[in-house]
């Protein structure tokens, strides 16, 4: 296989090293792994693209590039510049430092990269590592993803039917906040919602007295509905959530007919 990988934590992130190991396992000895990742951290940028300004791309080594843009930008660079004559068979994004379960998925640059690949007609999977007391300070904090991702990705690819929809499937995979041997299994789960836990803005003051605001995340260990992604993650399971970029509230189309 020829695999394109990206992330939102940046070209020097340890999670990208983990993803390179995962991708090499899947690609096989005769395969290729190509990296196009942001030159700087792009966490929380979602599916944004650098539509109004150009970006610098730097070749850092064989099959390894950094672009001064978002993860979605990096996928576009990979598909339409780096691999324009030899498109990849699969796009992987991650491994994110922290979970992209529940509402985090809506902000995630990791998912943004996978979403862009799906919009370009390619199979794509976003990978994220949940952290908690059991694994946050581990010597190799991404080992759970490294251990379990290759076989899971193969199973996802094999189980995915031919998808000719306008908005192609992509997958959001979150590895639980446990050590590799403590993973209980895999659950296919819908996206959850952490009630009462949300992003906020928190003021801080510089030594000169100027007021700055930092965006602050909510409690990541709030349970979501039973069987949903963050819930199964906190129970020790890997979650696999199939997604599409179609934002239509289909359940409301009939209810709104009267306004036509």
Image (cartoon, grey):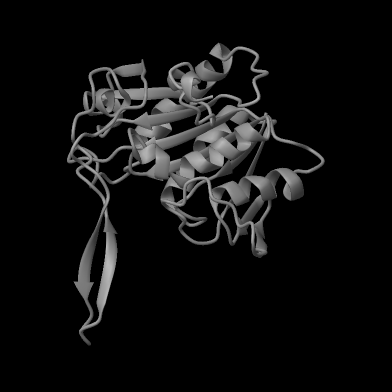
Say which of 135 and 25 sits in front: 135
Up-down: is 55 above or below 206?
A: above
| Position in image of residue 124 (x %, y %) | 57, 31
Up-down: is 85 above or below 234?
A: below
In the image, 151: left or right of 90? left
User: Residue furthest toward the right?
Assistant: 85
At horizontal 24% and vertical 34% (from top left) the residue drawn is: 194
| Position in image of residue 206 (x %, y %) | 23, 80
Up-down: is 207 above or below 63?
A: below
Say which of 172 and 192 sits in front: 192
Say which of 104 and 233 sits in front: 104
| Figure quadrant of residue 236 | top left
In the image, 34: left or right of 258? right
Q: How many numbered circles are shown?
A: 0
| Figure quadrant of residue 177 | top left
| Position in image of residue 108 (x %, y %) | 43, 44
At horizontal 65% and vertical 14% (from top left) the residue drawn is: 162
Q: Dividing the image into 4 quarters, which one contains the N terminus?
A: top right
At horizontal 78% and vertical 43% (from top left) the residue drawn is: 84
At horizontal 58% and vertical 58% (from top left) the residue drawn is: 69
Residue 174 seen in render: yes
User: Residue furthest toward the front?
Assistant: 259
| Figure quadrant of residue 98 | top left
Q: Dividing the image into 4 quarters, which one contains the C terminus?
A: top right
| Position in image of residue 137 (x %, y %) | 23, 47
Residue 152 seen in render: no
């Amino acid at each position: 296989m020829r695999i394109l990988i990206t992330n939102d934590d940046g070209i020097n992130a340890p999670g990208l090293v983990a993803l390179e190991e995962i991708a090499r396992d899947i690609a096989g000895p005769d395969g290729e792994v190509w990296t196009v990742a942001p030159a700087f951290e792009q966490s929380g940028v979602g599916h944004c693209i650098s539509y109004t300004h150009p970006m610098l791309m730097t070749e850092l080594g064989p099959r390894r590039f950094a672009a001064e843009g978002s993860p979605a930008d990096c996928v576009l660079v990979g598909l339409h510049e780096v691999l324009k004559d030899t498109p990849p068979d699969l796009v992987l994004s991650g491994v994110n430092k922290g979970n992209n379960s529940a509402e985090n998925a809506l902000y995630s640059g990791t998912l943004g990269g996978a979403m862009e690949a799906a919009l370009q007609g390619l199979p794509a999977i976003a990978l994220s590592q949940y952290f908690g007391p059991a694994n946050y300070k581990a010597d190799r904090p991404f080992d759970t993803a490294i251990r379990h991702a290759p076989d899971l990705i193969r199973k996802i690819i094999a189980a995915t039917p031919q998808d000719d929809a306008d908005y192609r499937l992509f997958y959001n995979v979150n590895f639980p906040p446990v050590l590799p041997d403590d993973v209980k299994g895999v659950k296919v789960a819908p996206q959850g919602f952490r009630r009462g836990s949300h992003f906020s803005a928190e003021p801080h003051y510089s030594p000169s007295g100027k007021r700055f605001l930092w965006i602050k995340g909510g409690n990541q260990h709030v349970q979501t509905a039973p069987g949903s992604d963050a819930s199964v993650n906190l129970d020790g399971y890997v979650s696999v959530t199939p997604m599409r970029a179609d934002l239509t509230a289909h359940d409301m189309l009939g209810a709104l007919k009267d306004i036509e």
